[in-house]
Amino acid sequence: MPGELSRRSAMVLRIPSIITMKEGITVSQTAAEQVERKRGVGLTDSQLRILGYIASCGAQGCSDTKNAIAEKLGVCPKTVDRAVRRMRDDGLIVSTARFDENGSQLGNVYFIGAGPR
């Protein structure tokens, strides 16, 4: 029925100053507003949740691995991989490689939009 929230859409609940996601992960109002602006881009529910999680990390970016993000959001690691790739290609997120003191790559840091400010 039009106007009703689907069961999957209900995974993201609006509360006055935060958004609460599955597993009790909360996102600040600013991060929530960033995610809501992205809704018109045609992202899936999983992609929106992943984008919200990355936004919740703030200006320092999200340094969690894709596996850690998947575990925290209750989705498959391949879902996170596909979502990150698509959102990076669409310019919704930017990833920057992290390296240790020996030059070995540790992983990526994910930022919303144009990266760190």
Image (cartoon, helix red, strand yellow):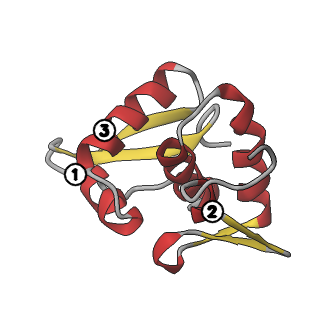
> Mark 3 or mark 2, which is nearer the start of the sequence?
2
Depth check: give the residue in front, 56 or 100.
56
Disc 2 and disc 3 in contact, CB within 8 angstroms: no
Residue at horizontal 53 percent and vertical 79 percent from the top: 24
Q: Residue furthest top?
A: 89
The residue that label 3 is drawn on is: 81
Distance between mark 2 and mark 1 Cα atoms:
40 Å
Quarter of the figure with the C terminus: top right
> Mark 3 or mark 1, which is nearer the start of the sequence?
3
Depth check: give the residue in front, 98 or 24.
24
> Mark 1 or mark 2, which is nearer the start of the sequence?
2
Q: Amino acid at mark 1?
A: Asp
Residue at horizontal 57 percent and vertical 59 percent from the top: 7
Q: Residues within 10 Å of mark 2 (few under 14, many from 20)?
A: few
| Location of residue 50 in the rendering, given as x and y in whole percent from the top left corner | 49, 50
Residue 45 at least partly seen: yes
- State which quadrant residue 27 falls in: bottom right
Residue at horizontal 29 percent and vertical 54 percent from the top: 65
The residue that label 2 is drawn on is: 10
| Location of residue 2 in the rendering, given as x and y in whole percent from the top left corner | 78, 43
The residue that label 1 is drawn on is: 100
Element assignment for label 3: helix
Depth check: give the residue in front, 22 or 100.
22
Disc 2 and disc 1 in contact, CB within 8 angstroms: no
Left or right side of 54 for 14: right
Distance between mark 2 and mark 3 Cα atoms:
23 Å
**In the rendered image of this protein, does residue 32 appear above or below residue 103?**
below
Residue 99 at least partly seen: no
